[in-house]
Image (cartoon, coloured by chain):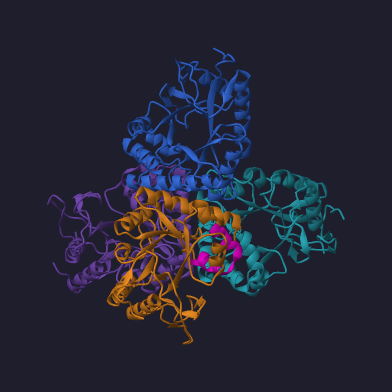
Chain colours: A cyan, B purple, C orange, D blue
Amino acid sequence: MVSDPTSEILVDLNCDLGEGYGVWRLTDDHALLTMVSSANIACGFHAGDASIMREMCHYAVANNVRIGAHVGYQDLAGFGRREWGGEVARLAADILYQLGALAAIAQAEGGEVSYVKPHGALYHQALTNREIAEAVVTATRALHSELAMMVMTPSVLATVATEQGVRVIVEAFADRAYASSAALLPRVQPGAVISDAESVANRALDLALGQPITDIKGRSFTLHPDSVCIHSDTPNAVAIVEATHQKLRAHGVQVTSQRTTRPQ
Amino acid sequence: MVSDPTSEILVDLNCDLGEGYGVWRLTDDHALLTMVSSANIACGFHAGDASIMREMCHYAVANNVRIGAHVGYQDLAGFGRREWGGEVARLAADILYQLGALAAIAQAEGGEVSYVKPHGALYHQALTNREIAEAVVTATRALHSELAMMVMTPSVLATVATEQGVRVIVEAFADRAYASSAALLPRVQPGAVISDAESVANRALDLALGQPITDIKGRSFTLHPDSVCIHSDTPNAVAIVEATHQKLRAHGVQVTSQRTTRPQ
Amino acid sequence: MVSDPTSEILVDLNCDLGEGYGVWRLTDDHALLTMVSSANIACGFHAGDASIMREMCHYAVANNVRIGAHVGYQDLAGFGRREWGGEVARLAADILYQLGALAAIAQAEGGEVSYVKPHGALYHQALTNREIAEAVVTATRALHSELAMMVMTPSVLATVATEQGVRVIVEAFADRAYASSAALLPRVQPGAVISDAESVANRALDLALGQPITDIKGRSFTLHPDSVCIHSDTPNAVAIVEATHQKLRAHGVQVTSQRTTRPQ
Amino acid sequence: MVSDPTSEILVDLNCDLGEGYGVWRLTDDHALLTMVSSANIACGFHAGDASIMREMCHYAVANNVRIGAHVGYQDLAGFGRREWGGEVARLAADILYQLGALAAIAQAEGGEVSYVKPHGALYHQALTNREIAEAVVTATRALHSELAMMVMTPSVLATVATEQGVRVIVEAFADRAYASSAALLPRVQPGAVISDAESVANRALDLALGQPITDIKGRSFTLHPDSVCIHSDTPNAVAIVEATHQKLRAHGVQVTSQRTTRPQ
């Protein structure tokens, strides 16, 4: 199962970064940027501001970390976790606004935005709501025809992206319990967030190696993600990502945003 | 003085547009977009939101109106008219954020951002404060090397732009009193805003033709602007711009954002 | 049915006022304050700011207009018309915050807050959602035990208010079509908003006199409101309220926030 | 100099609390609320939101901590540290709005607002600018005639408060270097913030006992504060306050918001 030197296993590790605002910070973004290979950078609507975005892009470029636009609902007070009750036409414009803002800042720092990953309630609503998924995909394509969409599958968002010719970066979650192979356990339910570093690291390794993991009811299933997500807003996020990073390397898995050779 | 058919006088007419937010509007943007040749579109910091920006870009493209980024301080409550007491490093990022957002939206509507014009207190502070002027110019160049800067001269902002290779679109104000040939009378002083449509139209014509105008003390001076600005936040802005538009055409002056042949 | 000189009919007329923000205004608040008897003053969350609130309270006191707190969701971008997807515990605190802010400003201007009327999506959700209605009522009682609740009936909000000992000011809408005697036609449906001044005035008179009105399907029903609401965000709101005011007086109905003698 | 059992020394210890927003926190407010005797609670303009304010009031009441309104400029992005360039008339309304909001929330939690302490740039500008100081004092008096003003002396704010009959709670800073006996060293200068817990504790003790302290140039001077402030936004704020609390008790000084018997 361990990789041999001639066919190394590669996995992308993504984290939500830059989710502060003004004087506030949610995690140690700098430490995380030395370990992840993809940074989902908040774009100022649910979190993040122009200065934080610039700082994140600067360090992402310096650490060769892929830049993603972590777009959300305009809701600093609710951190983008409140569902949208507005017009979808306005939503598409809001997303495009965020994408353009990050693209300009990334470019000024010598980088570029490679993918889009919705945040919070926008992510969850786009998994199942076609109208919202279309707003996300339409805005994504409007910015740049090469932009990819990072999202779990199966999902309406992944389907719409594929339909419209947007490449999907399939992600799986190492620190969230699954209700089934196709859905996360809602965050408010007990056991939804896995906070033990060793458990997350093991789960990330299984996901990277194409090994089965189990859902909340103990049922086994296998995912083949392009990218493994670890949340950055848990209190010990840095320790979790460190443990994961070490575990992966100890098993010969390289953390990189280059396209992986997925073990099937 | 009137143009002859073989050497038509051209003048650019610019207005601040899209300065609403959510349900609020400040003027009849649609009517103005049928008459001006350059639209300074608010970018969400002092006014404007993503949906309004998209609507403005859509109609600007439809009316063949040049798109400018009307960037401002992050101050919806004060309409960007309050002076900045923050760090200039943050300011440059804030401006870049706005430019990128508008650029993405303009592109999605089939247009592009051609120039930058600062708003309110940012405009006024950049006229004299080199550090602030540099933040504006640096952000402008970071977005696109061909972006121009619209500003009155002489001014520190025009100087810094020129030093850094950014083309300056020199503007003059048809509806504001001048304290001298080089400075506007502050908005709070009596007589600062000219609200009589006929007076504004005559002044715009003089500016377009390279004829002298007078300052608040009656001293005569001649400006040679590339663009004439009329404010859109006066109660009768639409009537003023209509009167100006008619007056200019009646005297053979064409309103266009194409480079003018300036009568010297 | 028409009032005789010895027992004059009284009706309260309420409008949403102060729904601007910074430089923006939605209507001519000053003109409306000379005609209505109750002012629902926006408290800064969906619209309004401290300076506008102070101005509204000042003119309300000067015109002997009753002051109500028009509380809403924290959503300037969406004018409080987007449904709430957040925690109800946070909502109660948000409402209390708004009530306290207006109470302090009203007091500084020599007035006082007499009632609470929720705005937009908060109003609509509180009509049917008990948890949200309880948040509104709890916050209302926490400010002042004598505060009343202005709302249409039958509704969950009116029921909860009554259960908790909060007096209900029953309102009806003169400028909105009813789907039935108990529900408005949603604003997005054709015919939902009545914008003809004469029609609104007649409807207001019928409501004041206890005469039947008809719903969108032509079915007749009779309401006995304590207060008649006319919206202030229609383009001709001032003309509508003027016509209504004249019509009422011409029929001997006095516009006042004093408790009405309701014709049954 | 050390207190004898029959005349115990009392000192008030105040901290800025509740300076988070939405998901963000700046310090461990709960821990600090078990040690301080006065809580300067952020009111939503520079930091704080309705839910955090309610939580702070709840724990302040539970811990018998005096509640103060920590009012600031409307500037979440700049944490209220950016100078105000707006109209003072608007400022007074903004302050009153914050005071009313906190007053309602404090009352709902069984407490009350006892004093006002401006934050950040508002504090610093009110120390020297009479117009701004008057806005703060006017708003304070408008809420409640018994409200006190917490501020350092000598200062324009203290003078204006006294002139208008507002009681002054004189504060001194245990964790900030003084440029002279009358002014703090600006925060941006080296050595301005004292972050060594033992040093702060000793300085707090000297202030409590009426012993001299030294300014940045080593000059000795004696202050007689009613209250000692320790900032809560330093990384080790909790450890600093703990060390101070212990030091004070070890020397027989009681931390309380009851009027102190000042050693002269």
Q: Residue furthest right?
A: A1
| A85 shown above or below B170 | below
Q: Can residue B101 be seen in this view?
A: yes
Closest to the observer: B118 or D243? D243
Instruction: From the top left corner, tell me how far across and down residue D132 is, in percent.
Output: 35, 39
Q: Which residue lies furthest to the top in this view?
A: D1
Q: For residue C123: magenta?
A: yes
Q: What residue is rendered at 54% in x and 46% in y?
A: D53
| D2 shown above or below A144 | above
Instruction: From the top left corner, tell me how far across and down residue D56 is, in percent.
Output: 57, 42
Q: What residue is rendered at 59% in x and 43% in y?
A: D58
Q: In this view, does B247 lie to the left or right of A18?
A: left
Instruction: From the top left corner, tell me how far across and down residue B150 is, in percent.
Output: 33, 56
The quadrant the N terminus of chain D occupies is top right
Q: Which residue lies furthest to the bottom in this view?
A: C218
Instruction: From the top left corner, tell me how far across and down residue C125 is, in percent.
Output: 55, 67
Q: What residue is rendered at 45% in x and 17% in y?
A: D222
Closest to the observer: D230 or C167? C167
For the record, the magenta segment spans C119-137
Q: Is residue A53 visible?
A: no
Q: For residue A38: magenta?
A: no
Q: What residue is rendered at 58% in x and 23% in y?
A: D254
